[in-house]
Image (spheres, grey):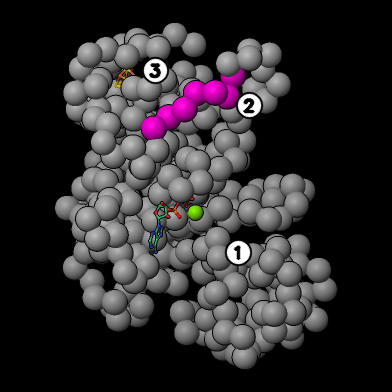
Amino acid sequence: MSEKNISMHVEGLSVRLGERYLLKEVGFKLNSGDVLGLIGETGSGKTVLIDAIGRNTASGLSMEAEKLDYMTDGQTIDMLKLKEDELGDAIWGKKLTFILSNARSRFSPIMTVGEQFINILKSNTNMTSQEAEKKAREMFSLVQMPDPAQNMRNYPHELSGGMIQRVEIAIALAMNPKFLLADEPTMGLDVTVQRQILDLMDGLFKKMDSTVILATRDLGIAANYCNKIAVLHNGNIVEFGDVKSFFANPRHPYSRYLLKIAFVANDKDPKFGQKVYRSEKDTEKKGCFCSGSCERIQEECLKKIPDLCRFPDGSFVRCSQYECGRDEHGCFEN
Ligand SMILES: Nc1ncnc2c1ncn2[C@@H]1O[C@H](COP(=O)(O)OP(=O)(O)O)[C@@H](O)[C@H]1O
Ligand code: SF4
Ligand SMILES: [Mg+2]
């Protein structure tokens, strides 16, 4: 990866609930224009990771990192050094926007969604009230909001979950952010609207050369809209790399399992779907979390959690069967 295009550099990012790690020493680099698909089953840590990268970790959880740098306009923003009021004033809503999966909780119940949209636009841009109102209406139409004028006048409780999600997306896109952290942004929307909105986001972010992290359980969305993939299992990234190589030749057995359950739903093999990967509850077991079900298991896999094996193109996998530095070396056949 060319160092000069790097737009996000994360190292040693962990989130804990007391002594329990919800995210463990996560690290990767992204370039400007990259759309990283963050995939993993429910509870794997997608939301915790998205929040931590945006310095928006829920209260009660503790976050630590060696590096959390955003690079834009020739400057490096060291997110770890910024205080909350500085993040609020200069970063959130301006350089970085979120699309959260629990969008409704972000809206005040006592103001119409239109008023809230206009206020956000005015406080984060130089727009006048008239310009902000015009922009809000345009964005409502862009995200296929039915009857935009009426829905601008509605309160959050008068909108369905899908419509609130569209308002959230409309606000995020109106900011033209250099960085977007999107947590299952189109969940709950019907498939046609999902595709229209993802196409719209795709076009806007290509134009802006934005860096996007898109958490999704839908591997079809990841395959169609992302150029990089990170596979999360129990707060660890077990595989990271280019989307084409990932779908053509996933390296980690758990990645293969995710692909199988996503794309081979009618598999005739009676053993299909019975693979059980160890969950966070099996704390007494040592070694790789795949050791109960991996057909390539060796003695060393049971002794300790495998180290990351990094490849020259920036991709990596957490499996002891790979020899670091040799991109073509893989022990698992398709
Ligand atoms: N605020 C929190 N307090 C306690 N535990 C949490 C909190 N947020 C997430 N977790 C736990 O962290 C793990 C990862 O959760 P999450 O990131 O929401 O998963 P995903 O988004 O992949 O479904 C889960 O075990 C979840 O229960
Ligand atoms: S480390 Fe061992 S058990 Fe884990 S995925 Fe690799 S080969 Fe399988
Ligand atoms: Mg989540």
Tag nearer the camera, 1 or 3: 3
Apparent side of residue 118 relative to residue 183 in the rendered image (left or right): right
Residue type at tag 1: Ile
Per the image, label 3 sits on a secondary structure element best described as loop
Q: Which residue is mark 1?
A: 169
- Residue 5 visible in this rendered orientation of the protein: no
Magenta span of residues? 272-278
- Quarter of the view holding residue 271: top right
Q: Is residue 207 above or below residue 328?
A: below
Q: Position of residue 187 (x, y in %)?
A: 63, 53
Tag nearer the camera, 3 or 2: 3
Q: Residues within 10 Å of mark 2 (few under 14, many from 20)?
A: few
Q: Residues within 10 Å of mark 1 (few under 14, many from 20)?
A: many
Residue at disc 3, CB closer than 8 Å to ligand 2: yes
Q: Position of residue 213 (x, y in %)?
A: 45, 50
**Looking at the image, is mark 3 or mark 2 earlier in the sequence?**
2
Instruction: Specify whether residue 199 is painted magenta.
Output: no
Q: Are marks 1 and 2 in contact (CB under 8 Å)?
A: no
Q: Which residue is mark 3?
A: 294
Task: Name the quarter showing ligand 1.
Answer: bottom left
CA separation in Å, label 1 and label 3: 40 Å
Q: Are marks 1 and 3 in contact (CB under 8 Å)?
A: no
User: Chief secondary structure of the magenta span?
Assistant: loop
Q: Quadrant of the N terminus?
A: top left
Q: Which residue is mark 2?
A: 263
Task: Residue at 23%, 71% (x, y): give it.
Answer: 82
For this orientation, the residue located farthest to the front is 284
